[in-house]
Image: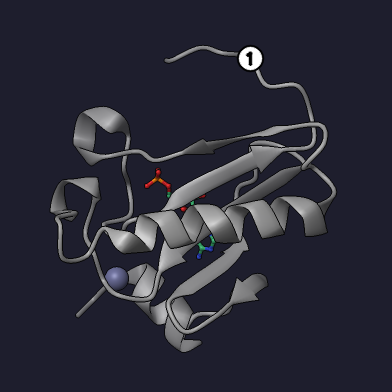
Amino acid sequence: MDCLFCKIIKGEIPSSKVYEDDAVFAFRDIEPQAPVHILIIPKEHIASANDLNDENSAIVGHIFSVAAKIAKSEGIAEGGYRIVNNCGADGGQTVGHLHFHMLGGRSLAWQTG
Ligand code: AMP
Ligand code: ZN
């Protein structure tokens, strides 16, 4: 399957890895929107939040527990951060592999464009 993030997981495309376990991979966004901008993704190819269901959605809980660990290791747990999922065209999703943006390291405005 021709998926950018599946290739990053397999190491076929280089990335700045932050965390990896059996089910999850996390790496720095190539166009950071904040001092800390990390993408946390399931290793299983799930195209978007629309493709979550009772069989595969446990990974989302695991992703949030990984996010809490990463927040500590990145030094943003106390200051706070934002976790964002863009779904589909109107949501601004540009890569068709489920991913959660973790943004932190500065005070974030609350605005949707
Ligand atoms: P989204 O617009 O929510 O689908 O987010 C996709 C994100 O992937 C964007 O923030 C991009 O900057 C990021 N991105 C695209 N290609 C790469 C790459 N090769 N390595 C790291 N991040 C990437
Ligand atoms: Zn994929």
Residue annotated with mark 1? 109
Residue in view at x 73 percent, y 32 percent: 80
For mark 1, give the secondary structure: loop
Q: Is residue 16 above or below residue 77?
A: below
Identify the residue at horizontal 21%, vertical 59% (top origin). Answer: 47
Count residues near mark 1 (Cα–Cα under 10 Å), then give few for <14, some for 14-19, many for 20+. Answer: few
Q: Does the beta carbon of the residue at mark 1 sit less than 8 Å from ligand 1?
A: no
Is residue 80 among what the camera can see?
yes
Determine whether 27 is above or below 110 in the image.
below
Q: Quadrant of the C terminus?
A: top left
Q: Position of residue 23 (x, y in %)?
A: 42, 77
Left or right: 59 as drawn, with respect to 53: right
Three-letter residue code for mark 1: Ala
Residue depicted at 19% across the width and 54% down the height: 52
Total of numbered circles in the picture?
1
Tell whether 7 sits left or right of 73.
left
Place residue 112 in its image quadrant: top left
Task: Choose top left, top right, bottom left or bottom right for residue 17.
Answer: bottom right
When the figure is inspected, residue 69 is found, relative to residue 110, above or below; the finding is below
Q: Nearer the viewer, residue 35 or 75?
A: 75
Q: Residue at x 15, y 57 (%)?
A: 54
Q: Nearer the viewer, residue 82 or 4?
A: 82
78 sits left or right of 36 in the view: right
Q: Position of residue 32 (x, y in %)?
A: 65, 45
**Residue 30 visible somewhere in the drawing:** no
Quadrant including the N terminus = bottom left
Left/right placement of residue 18 relative to residue 62 reads right
Q: How is the image coloured?
A: one colour
Q: Nearer the viewer, residue 45 or 58?
A: 58
x and y, in percent, of residue 109 in the image: 63, 14
The vertical placement of 43 against 34, above or below, is below
